[in-house]
Amino acid sequence: MSVLIDVKNLHKSFKNNEVLKGISTEIKKGEVVVVIGPSGSGKSTFLRCLNLLETPTSGQIFFEEQNITDAQNDLYHMREKMGMVFQNFNLFPNMNVLANITLAPRKVKNISNSEAEKIAEKLLVQVGLADKATAYPQSLSGGQKQRIAIARALAMQPDVMLFDEPTSALDPEMVGEVLQVMQDLAKDGMTMVIVTHEMGFAKEVADRVLFMDEGIIMEEGTPTAIFDQPKHPRTISFLSKVL
Ligand code: ADP
Ligand code: MG
């Protein structure tokens, strides 16, 4: 598998608070990487650095062989090619579902209305919400909102999808429908980096699990290695609390 994202010795500080203390990892094309770890360990900051929502303090990130941390490079291509899904959906409340999904493709990629709507309708089928094209976000359940947020990210035809605790804000009965959409994506070969506390999902879907603690990758491996034979005491302690 070829490398899609290459992270080299990534550091991030907020003022005097060093949150990421040297992260190095390669995300391969088609790989599903699940990031786990205690609250405050830097998981969100790591994810946000990958698409430069946060500016790294030092280190490099290569995306499709381009050094995106080099100020010389323009970021538009990278931003189009990395989809991100947040805990709180972030749908535009004043737009219906179809408008939410077609906005970026129309504005950023300059594709026609009808073409954008065709893509959106296909995506709505994919996330099981074909009947919601004209609905407004406020009328949707949390699980439906999150599936729309996923469809909206996919509408840009990204090469990688980043998920930051996509099910953490959901009522328990809605977690499954969102995880199902993500699992289908993984099966279709989408490259994914997923921060989650859903350990069952991680076990089933991840190719690789990163355990982050105190701003570093404390341990990484296959789901079997991490969940069944964790080696680091911090991993063992964390898993004993969440499993
Ligand atoms: P996690 O996602 O693992 O819970 P975060 O990456 O959100 O961890 O946060 C790690 C640390 O970085 C926390 O101490 C948090 O307060 C700090 N932090 C995150 N974002 C910011 C920010 N924008 N400004 C200042 N501190 C931040
Ligand atoms: Mg977080």
Image (cartoon, rainbow, N blue to C red):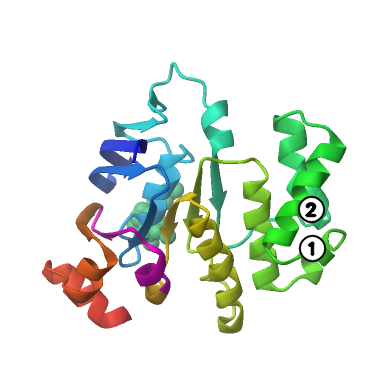
Residue 238 colored in magenta in the image:
no
Q: Amino acid at mark 2?
A: Glu
Q: Which residues are magenta?
A: 201-215
Q: Which mark is residue 130?
A: 1
| Of the pair 232 and 180, the residue shown nearer to us | 180
Relative height, residue 104 to residue 84 (above, below): above
Q: Residues within 10 Å of mark 1 (few under 14, many from 20)?
A: some
Residue 204 colored in magenta in the image:
yes
Quick check: is the Cβ at mark 1 less than 8 Å away from ligand 2?
Answer: no
The picture places residue 21, in percent across and down from the top left corner, at 22, 45
Residue under the image location 34 percent in, 44 percent down: 27
Which corner quadrant holds the N terminus?
top left
User: Is residue 87 visible to the viewer in this orientation of the structure?
Assistant: no
Q: Amino acid at mark 1?
A: Ala
Relative height, residue 148 to residue 76 (above, below): below
Residue where numbered disc 2 is placed: 121
Relative height, residue 235 to residue 105 (above, below): below
| Of the pair 183 and 148, the residue shown nearer to us | 183
Q: Residues within 10 Å of mark 2 (few under 14, many from 20)?
A: some
